[in-house]
Image: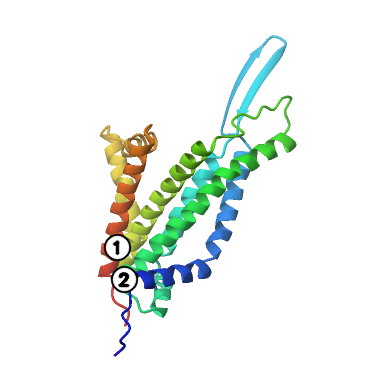
Amino acid sequence: MSLIEVQTADIVKKQFSYKWRAYIGVFTSLVIIQLLGVLFSLNGTGSRGRGTTGYDIRIDYFNADMVLIFTIFWGFITAFLLTTKAYREDDFAFVTNRASSTFSTIAFLFTICGIGAITAILSGYLLKVITYFFLPGEEIFLAGGAVGPGVFIIGFLATTLSIFLFSSIGYLSGMIIQWNKMFVILLPVIVFGTLILLSRSGMSVDSFVLKFIFQESNFILFVIKTIAATTIFYALATLISNRLEVKQ
């Protein structure tokens, strides 16, 4: 019997360090997905036009919204893949349990979501450089090229929490499927079926969620709402992970 008492926090730190080195491929996929977002953004995220006798005016707007959407999708898929058996069994190289494994995975996801958030924000500047030097146009006006540190920090935190929220949904979905493989078919049917039925009855869940969280004008309330929702999703995923069969 070992006289050394193993601390859960130490195990989580070791597992996090291991995952940081072992799952380096997530950053390759992040770069690829954000470059795709930049490519799709070159068509512009909005436009308006006006024409009179003698001249026509067309205004195209460019921002990193498409890159953010792609990054959110990347966060969802990455979290989903980390629930698969191949990734979960990597933790058994350590003295561990379901709780410490889940905590280290959540910490890892939060870290990479922060990295994804800052690169998504910075991609907006890359997009402006590309549009300025390579896209045709009679006049190019760059607006919002510089922001104060306070605005940048708020934008970074909001973006990180948004990606982390969707990663929690991906992680919960993955755990549900790992718990019972039948949910590979049932889960999409239940989700989309419920959305369609509620939409036909006049209750749009997606519109409600969009207004309730992502159109919140008060930043403090936005943080509280996203953290609360993320905590619920990860807590449910943790409960489900504890019901998975123990590796023999």
Q: Earlier in the sequence, mark 1 or mark 2?
A: 2
Q: Quadrant of residue 215?
A: top left
Q: Which residue corresponds to mark 1?
A: 238
In the rendered image, is residue 180 in sight?
no
Label 2, on which residue? 98
- Name the foreground residue: 158 vs 1: 1
Looking at the image, the residue that sits furthest to the top is: 53
Q: Residues within 10 Å of mark 2 (few under 14, many from 20)?
A: some
Question: Which structural element holds mark 1?
Answer: helix
* Tag 1: amino acid: Thr
Residue at left offset 43%, top offset 58%? 109
Residue depicted at 33% across the width and 74% down the height? 7
Relative horizontal placement of residue 177, taking residue 130 as reference (left or right): left
Callout 1: few (<14), some (14-19), or many (20+) C-alpha neighbours within 10 Å?
A: some
Q: Are marks 1 and 2 in contact (CB under 8 Å)?
A: yes
Q: Position of residue 224 (x, y in %)?
A: 32, 43
Distance in Å between CA atoms under marks 1 and 2: 8 Å
Q: Amino acid at mark 2?
A: Arg
202 or 88: nearer the viewer: 88
